[in-house]
Image: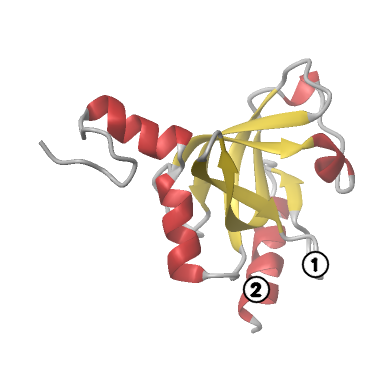
Amino acid sequence: MNADHHGQTLGTDMEKMGKNYYRDEVVALRLSLGETPVIFTGRYKHSSNDAWAVFTTIRPYTPGQRSPTICNHVNIRRRTIDRYLQVSELDHNHKFYFVGRSSTYVHHGEERGCIEIASDLACPVFWKATPSERSDAYARAAATTIIGL
């Protein structure tokens, strides 16, 4: 059997651990893109936690395409989100867009991937998906800022 970079045996459960606990694909984005911001989508999951907000089904946003899920969830500090908009119980399961940079942190001695909101950009960095074209307009503005068109 093969061993992954965490010294564990590969298999379905370990692949899920790599994707969802260690967030290997988020780490891979960091290795390939460095500090380049990425537009992500995720679904807000309301909880009673005052410090953290959970977003699930995390995907890099590619206009006109359905991107693969790169991890099942990320936690983002509520105080960070509060700078841009208020999320509440009414937003449970709604899709949001956010602009961030792939990063890592150490938890119990293990490196894990995370997404840090790119608050230094002069464009929208957090918004709720809407049925109107506003979501796409924000995404285009963010993409233009990121790539400098």
Number of numbered discs: 2
Give the mark nearer the N terminus: 1 vs 2: 1
With 76 as the anchor, is 58 left or right in this view? left
Q: Can residue 88 be seen here?
A: yes
**Where does residue 123 sit, x and y in percent of width and height?**
78, 66
- For marks 1 and 2, give the one nearer the viewer: 1
- Using the rendered view, name the quadrant where residue 13 is placed: top left
Is residue 25 shown above or below 43? below
* Residue type at numbered disc 1: Asp
* Residue type at numbered disc 2: Ile
Is residue 48 shown above or below 15? above
**Where does residue 125 sit, x and y in percent of width and height?**
75, 56
Numbered disc 2: secondary structure: helix
Q: Can residue 66 be seen here?
A: no
With 85 as the anchor, is 20 left or right in this view? left
* Residue that lies at the very extreme toward the bottom in this rendered image: 149
Write the residue at 66% across / 30% down.
Answer: 54
**Where does residue 10 sit, x and y in percent of width and height?**
21, 35
User: Circle 1: is it few (<14), some (14-19), or many (20+) Cα within 10 Å?
Assistant: few
User: Circle 2: is it few (<14), some (14-19), or many (20+) Cα within 10 Å?
Assistant: some
Query: What residue would you read off at disc 1?
Result: 120
Write the residue at 68% across / 53% down.
Answer: 116
Query: What residue would you read off at disc 2?
Result: 146
Is residue 93 shown above or below 100? above
* Residue that lies at the very extreme toward the left in this rendered image: 1
Q: Dividing the image into 4 quarters, which one contains the C terminus?
A: bottom right
Write the residue at 51% across / 60% down.
Answer: 63
Between the C-alphas of marks 1 and 2, the distance is: 11 Å
Question: Along the line of sight, which residue is nearer the eye, 27 or 136?
Answer: 27
With 140 as the anchor, is 81 left or right in this view? right
| Number of the label disc, if any, that sits on residue 63 | none
